[in-house]
Image (tube, rainbow, N blue to C red):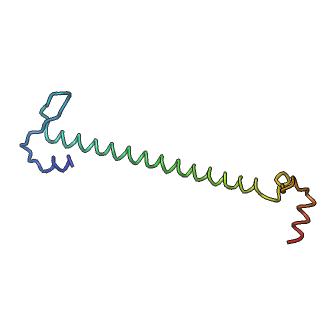
Amino acid sequence: MVLKELEQLDDSSSVYKLIGSVLIKQGLLEARGNVTKRLEFIQDETDRLDKNIRKLENEQDVKHKEVRVRTRVNRSPYRSDSFTSISGHWTKADVAQSLNKT
């Protein structure tokens, strides 16, 4: 928006820059250059942060998949340490027998 306003000015226009509580006269070309550099800086920072966010989201997805796989393995009825029944623990023979029934 500021850059558009500066582009509409003719070369004889006066531009002032606020430094502290003082307005200082600045050349039009210098003002356009400063605004352009600030916009480039903001765009570069936005791109860098977006890239960082995508990297973190990818890492999060990998960790989420690892947790899902570990949870699935830990709940597997085929693991010897996860055989439980209402009355207590199943034996491997109980599990083998129930698998043979299906």
> Residue 60 or 30: which is nearer the viewer?
60
Q: Residue at x 67, y 55 (%)?
A: 68
Could you tell me residue 46's position as x and y percent?
38, 46
Q: Residue at x 7, y 42 (%)?
A: 13
Could you tell me residue 101's position as x and y percent?
88, 71
Could you tell me residue 39's position as x and y percent?
29, 45
Residue found farthest to the right: 93
Could you tell me residue 86's position as x and y percent?
83, 56
Q: Is residue 94 above or below residue 15?
A: below
Q: Quadrant of the C terminus?
A: bottom right
Q: Is residue 34 above or below residue 21?
A: below
Residue found farthest to the left: 12
> Residue 84 or 52: which is nearer the viewer?
84
User: On the picture, is 89 further left or further right than 54?
Assistant: right
> Residue 13 or 89: which is nearer the viewer?
89
Q: Residue at x 28, y 41 (%)?
A: 38
Residue found farthest to the top: 21
User: On the picture, is 13 further left or further right than 46?
Assistant: left
